[in-house]
Amino acid sequence: MASLISENLKFFSLFFKSRDVMIFNGLVALGTVGSQELFSVVAFHCPCSPERNYMYGLAAIGVPALVLFLVGIILNNHTWNLVAAECRKRAMRNCSIPATFLLFGSIAGRAAVAPVTWSVISLLRGEAYVCARSEFLNRNTFLDFPIGKGQEDMAKFPCKDTPTELLVFKEEVIRRLKYESQFSAGF
């Protein structure tokens, strides 16, 4: 019985060692999805202002992704091997151009898991995109849209204080923008 348990433990150990990168990337992606959900609930609130919506929405998608990428690079052991001049210590034996290119590719590839996950989840949810793009919708594409309503009013579509005469258009505006956002997540 003990040998059977020992065999199974060895099998699981070998299985996870051979797939440690895949498991690590999966855990990073799951952590990023959880962080994105928490950010959406706790920290993301569209300013509902034509001067601020666009920058705020783009920042909500891009800044955390950039921070996650930089943290991924900093936490990668290979980065610190390069910084510590590993190539010079080895007398440039293993640091040919292809080897260095592969090392940089490995560092960037591992660091890109979290930011790509963040960006895709943000675009699939569409809240930041709706905030950023609401004021830029063409009012002429909506049937019977009130004349005299401008960017100030369009910027309020993602918010609770949408003008009452525009409430009938709110669902359609958000649906269109979420469609655009989800479509762009596929590319």
Image (spheres, grey):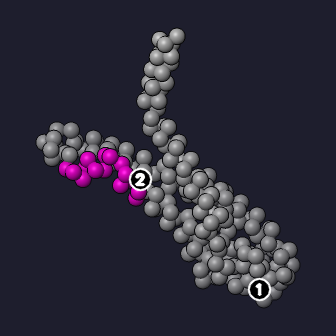
Tell me which residue sits at (72%, 75%) in the image.
Answer: 159
Let me know if residue 184 appears in the view. no
**Place of residue 23 in the rendered image (x, y in percent of width and height, measured from the top left):** 50, 37
Q: Are the residues tagged 1 and 2 within 8 Å (C-beta)?
A: no
Let me know if residue 23 appears in the view. yes
User: In the drawing, does residue 73 fall left or right of residue 183?
Assistant: left
User: In the drawing, does residue 81 fall left or right of residue 41?
Assistant: left
Categorize mark 1 by other alpha carbons within 10 Å: few (<14), some (14-19), many (20+).
few
Q: Quadrant of residue 36?
A: bottom right
Q: Which residue matches tag 1?
A: 149
Tell me which residue sits at (62%, 69%) in the image.
Answer: 44
Provide the secondary structure element on which disc 1 rests. loop
Identify the main secondary structure in magenta: helix
**Place of residue 75 in the rendered image (x, y in percent of width and height, measured from the top left):** 37, 51
* Mark 1 vs mark 2, CA separation in Å: 45 Å
**Residue stretch in magenta:** 70-85
Compare marks 1 and 2 and give the one earlier in the sequence: 2
User: In the drawing, does residue 167 fall left or right of residue 51?
Assistant: right
Q: Which residue matches tag 2?
A: 72
User: In the drawing, does residue 94 fall left or right of residue 11?
Assistant: left
109 vs 167: above or below: above
